[in-house]
Amino acid sequence: MCQENRTGRVHCMIVSNEPLAEDVRELVFESPAMADEARPGQFVNLYCRHQGQLLPRPISICEIDRAGGRLHLVYACRGKGTREFADYRPGERVEVMGPLGNGFSLDAAGPENLVIGGGVGTPPLLELCKRLTGRTTIAVSFRSAPYLIDRLERCGEVLVATRDGSAGVRGNAMKIVEDRGLTGNIFACGPTPMLAAVQAYAARRDLPAQLSLEERMGCGFGCCVGCVTKVRDASEAGFSYRKVCKDGPVFAAGEVIFS
Amino acid sequence: MNLGVNIAGVELKNPIMTASGTFGSGKDFAPYVDLNRIGCVVVKGVASTPWPGNRPPRIAEAYGGIINAVGLQNPGVDAFCQDDIPFLRGFDTRIAVNIAGRTIDEYVEVAERLATADVDLLELNISCPNVKEGGVAFGVDPAMAEAVTRAVKAVAGQPLIVKLSPNVTDIAAIARAAERGGADAVSLINTLLGARIDVRRRAFVLSTKQGGLSGPAVKPVAVRMVYEVARAVDLPVIGMGGIMTGEDAAEFLMAGANAVAVGTANLLNPTATMDILDGLVAFMEETGVDDVNDLVGVVE
């Protein structure tokens, strides 16, 4: 039987682990194999050293440095696991598995692209923006201090919103999109309420949209069926639960049911 | 060195099985492990019709374990027979099918459908804590456990394993009831009922409030129960509950298990079955054990 062989958990050398904003850090690690394979919108599992914290933390890939054989991850230090990662130093090793998930389809990119990100939903959009051709407008929102803006600006026009109004427009990225009536092929990643708003906007304007979803994950490779989202289908119930980690995290906006 | 074990007349090349619901039907693991090296793949629970499963969130971390409330999402027995049996038969491993149901009739329907299917063993799931009706209700009452075992055994085309719930006062009594009902083997433990509350949100983490705790946190409970059950019944015992290493597997064998199942470890590490098998072999070499069966029930 022909099978694609994959390695499981591997220890990778940390190149850097620097803060980007309050409680947000960028971790760069070496893995030529993963950098070769990764696509925008995919994620990796990071495993804690603490043996009480068994589940992997799924962290989306922010940048893929294929030439340098490195992946860049941006993560929010929110819980026990990510606070452990915050203490990792260059030269140490981090245990990783990946890349995982489907990633964005670049075939859907058009002459006009609209990229919408909220909070730590923004980092996975950076590698995508680097690869999009055509005119790209990038609307991103943050709780407070923005990050990654300089890197995003190399890929297109960047419009910023913050919840506390400390930079750009006060509000979230969808406020910018709605106020300006922005259009294009949509790629979005962020909190669920924002993605629901993107879905509604895309439907109203008849714009193609891909959404990268967030859900509590277990294994990260499709086995535990812990992270699911409702996806429309022809069954009696009108939907089935699909795995965010394996069937996603990127779904076509039209197929997702937010409820 | 002999690693082969016999479960109800079915020869397994080694005592490493997978715990139902932690290995799918093996497809997600095939890129990571050689399925030919697994003694028996126990597939995720299969019901008579497709089940949607519970609303998310379905999974949460607990110290040294995880709590899940998946709710036996499965595509139904017809889809299973069509897609998964041919896939698994491409490998030299045994196949056990975990049967889910809400009523005796539903369990019987699945067993009937599988009677002529090309699988080696059935595992009756009377212990899933995550479905509202049936499931665990059969697993906590000896009379009901006996009745559902008898009904399924009457139509089964393969030896029948009954999977026991740890959420009982006396698990040996349930094991004896399954034996009276005609079980050919028992497996234990399923998950322990638990709950987690998000204190910032002042709400349960899981959509179903409670779920099933598994992983290394439950291992001492499982070892104790395997020991009790192995002494209470004259049936092969499949032990599971938090096995992460070869020495953990040896611990279950010494408690009286004839084979072991790897569960939560699969979700944390897709190569866990191989690592545990290699670890068990290393342990046997190190301690001068030539036959894995010589470890079974060695503690008094």
Image (cartoon, coloured by chain):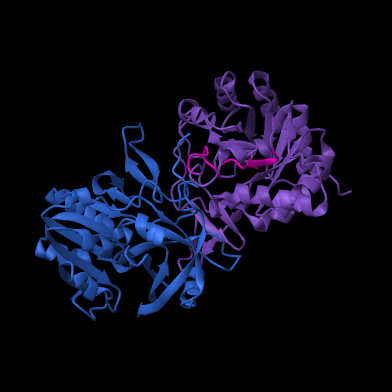
Chain colours: A blue, B purple
Q: Is residue B299 magenta?
A: no
- The picture quadrant where one finds residue A201 is bottom left
* Residue B285 appears anywhere in the view: yes
Query: Residue B258's x, y, as percent?
Result: 76, 39
Find the residue positioned furthest to the right: B300
Residue B155 x %, y %: 64, 19
Residue A191 location in percent, x, y?
A: 32, 62
Q: Is residue A172 visible?
A: no
- The residue stretch that appears in magenta: B14-28
Residue B18 painted magenta? yes
Quarter of the image holding residue B113?
A: top right
In the rendered view, does B100 fall on the left or right side of A254? right
Q: Residue A120: name its quadrant.
A: bottom left
Q: Is residue B107 left or right of residue B146?
A: left
Identify the residue at image location x=47%, y=45%. Answer: B54
Relative to residue B56, is residue A58 depicted above or below? Answer: below
